[in-house]
Image (cartoon, rainbow, N blue to C red):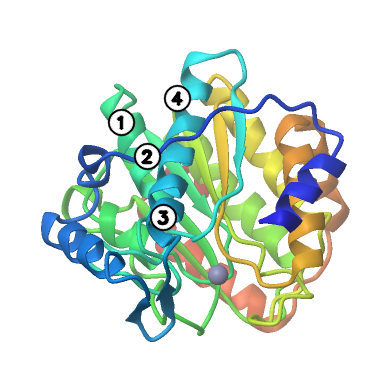
Amino acid sequence: MAAAERGLLESGVRQCAVSGRLASAEEILRVHSNEYLSRLELALARGQGFLDGDTFFSGGSHKAVWGAAGAVIAAVDASLDTEIHQGVVIVRPPGHHATIDRAMGFCMLNNVAIAAAHARSRGLKRLAIVDWDVHHGNGTQDIFISDPSVLFVSLHQWPIYPGTGRADDVGERDGLGRTVNLPLPANGNGAVYAAAFERIVLPILDEFEPELLLISAGFDAHERDPLSGMRLKSTDYAWMASSLRRVADKHAESRIVLALEGGYDLRAIEQSFANSARGLVTPAEAELISEFRGVKLDYEAEQALRSIEKIQRTHWSSLR
Ligand SMILES: [Zn+2]
């Protein structure tokens, strides 16, 4: 967290701090089950231990976990109620692996999903969550799988933890077509992400017309990250954030909130967070995507994008 804060300070972005708070049970129960919430509270009251193989908790976890969810809610409220429509939230633990009824992969409460449900409770009808963490946001997908009001878009390395997020998982029942998975082969660089944005992510967002955008911003697709095999550079996060800001400008009254998820190299987090914050407030940074136009992708990446396009064409006329 300190690295992300340092990055934000060095980004040169003019800031206005919003007070965070703890999420309430009512807010949490919009996305997690009653049974899970009771189980989680009981476990955390024990002091320290593991909720699954890699989800450790300690004495400070309750405050951190409830505070993380509450902070993303507070940022959503600020984007709706004040003239500051772009928010960044530096929190840990992350949330996107937490499912309706299970803690997973360092995540206990699904911060971004709770914030999306909060925005909906405030009357918004269409919300988009873009998850660029290198791991699939299985928890967020699980929570909104049959919900047509939340578009969930995840770009992730494939196949790695948690093993979900296939291209043909496209949502269920009323939510059919509202889950957009982009599983990408290892070694994906800026050119691959730029092609994914221009050919799939941005047209779909534009067609969906979200009233608020939330970004599950892990920085573990960075080339320095020890847990992944992707090759994004810190500057790639500027045009990614900025492209999403453009969508927010067009459809969502510029409302966009970015929340930290994973990322395990401190220097990468610091620099990438700074670039994301700058991109979020500078729509013109989106132009940097043009550097990648005309770059030929390697065979595997091109095939992955083509098969995702083919699947998504059924649901989005803008891709036809
Ligand atoms: Zn991750």
Which label lies toward us, 1 or 4?
A: 4
Mark 2 vs mark 4, CA separation in Å: 11 Å
Tag 2: residue type? Ala
**Label 2, residues with CA under 10 Å away: few <14, some 14-19, many ≥20:** many
Q: Are marks 2 and 4 in contact (CB under 8 Å)?
A: no
The quarter holding residue 142 reads bottom left
Disc number at residue 207? Answer: none
Q: Earlier in the sequence, mark 2 or mark 4?
A: 4
Disc number at residue 65? Answer: 3
Q: Quadrant of ligand 1?
A: bottom right
Local secondary structure at mark 1: helix
Residue farthest left in this picture: 35
Residue at image point 72% right, 53% down: 4
Q: Is residue 293 left or right of residue 170?
A: right
Q: Which residue is mark 4?
A: 77
Residue at image point 13% right, 54% down: 34
Q: Earlier in the sequence, mark 3 or mark 2?
A: 3
Which label lies toward us, 3 or 2?
A: 3
Which label lies toward us, 4 or 3?
A: 3
Q: Earlier in the sequence, mark 4 or mark 3?
A: 3
**Label 4, residues with CA under 10 Å away: few <14, some 14-19, many ≥20:** some
Tag 4: residue type? Asp
In terms of depth relative to the viewer, which is nearer, 53 or 262?
53
Q: Are marks 1 and 2 in contact (CB under 8 Å)?
A: yes
Q: Residue 282: where, in percent of width, then height?
A: 78, 31
Q: Which residue is mark 2?
A: 116
Mark 1 vs mark 2, CA separation in Å: 6 Å
Q: Say above or below: 140 vs 202.
A: below
Mark 1 vs mark 3, CA separation in Å: 21 Å
Which label lies toward us, 2 or 4?
A: 4
Q: Earlier in the sequence, mark 1 or mark 4?
A: 4
